[in-house]
Image (cartoon, rainbow, N blue to C red):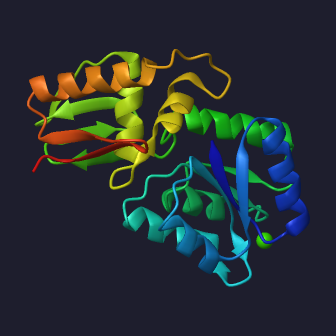
Amino acid sequence: MRLLIVEDNEELAELLAKGLKTAGYEADMLSTVEEARAVLSTTFYAAMILDLGLPDGDGLELLREIRQRDNPIPVLVLTARGGLTDRVHGLRSGADDYLVKPFALEELIARLEAQLRRPGQLLGSNLRIANLAFDTQNRQASIDDQPQVLSARETAVLELLMRSKGRVVSKKQVEDHIFGHSGEVASNAIEVYVHRLRKQLSERGARVQVHTIRGVGYLIAEEK
Ligand code: CA
């Protein structure tokens, strides 16, 4: 699972990357808003750790921008600012969670893992493609505004696909999302869940298609 760290304090960024690696995550490190903006438009990350005070701008601006582009990546904000107003402001700009510096690495990893398991838990947002919607707060799918009952794993697959709309999700990402990075998974398990989800969506009249991009992964899109 690949994460993005945007933090201009090199020492802290390296400490985070090292700690995350020990916990089983690969992390790329960037130190400016501009670099992050460029990389986020082309690369899929499972989550982002974002410092607010960056040399070329405010992390919150970047956050607002990516949310405006409907990028639902879970974002954990790091802030040195102690004022409650700033924190609330940050969350409203689309952060999923925040930590005030200094913090313990264990805490960061725990918060991050909570976000990876249940993205959008704090912020909550309604993701939509055609007549299919997914509420990330209640983890509820609906078709034509009618709530749908799906199994826990179908829901997890759908959530990841919806949060990554417009981008291909690799089989490995689906696997990590459902089972965590330590799970033992049968080789065809992901295909089975995707197949079931596809069938459920089609039977219930969702005007979306879950495409299999051979050798790459899956992509959800409006039915053409
Ligand atoms: Ca900083």
Left or right for 86, reference 126:
right
Which residue is at a point 52% across and 31% down the rendered structure image?
A: 177
The quarter of the rendering in which ligand 1 is drawn is bottom right
Which residue is at a point 81% across and 52% down the rendered structure image?
A: 17
Q: Is residue 124 visible?
A: no
123 relative to 79, above or below: above
Instruction: Give coordinates of residue 10: x percent, y percent.
Output: 86, 68
Q: Is residue 159 visible?
A: yes
The image quarter containing residue 90 is bottom right
Instruction: Give coordinates of residue 68: x percent, y percent.
Output: 38, 67
Instruction: Give coordinates of residue 116: x percent, y percent.
Output: 58, 37
Which residue is at a point 52% across and 15% down the rendered structure image?
A: 186
Which residue is at a point 56% across and 52% down the rendered structure image?
A: 45
Q: Look at the image and tell me in which quarter the N terminus lies.
A: top right
For the residue pair 219 and 187, the one nearer the viewer reads as 187
For the residue pair 65 and 164, the one nearer the viewer reads as 164
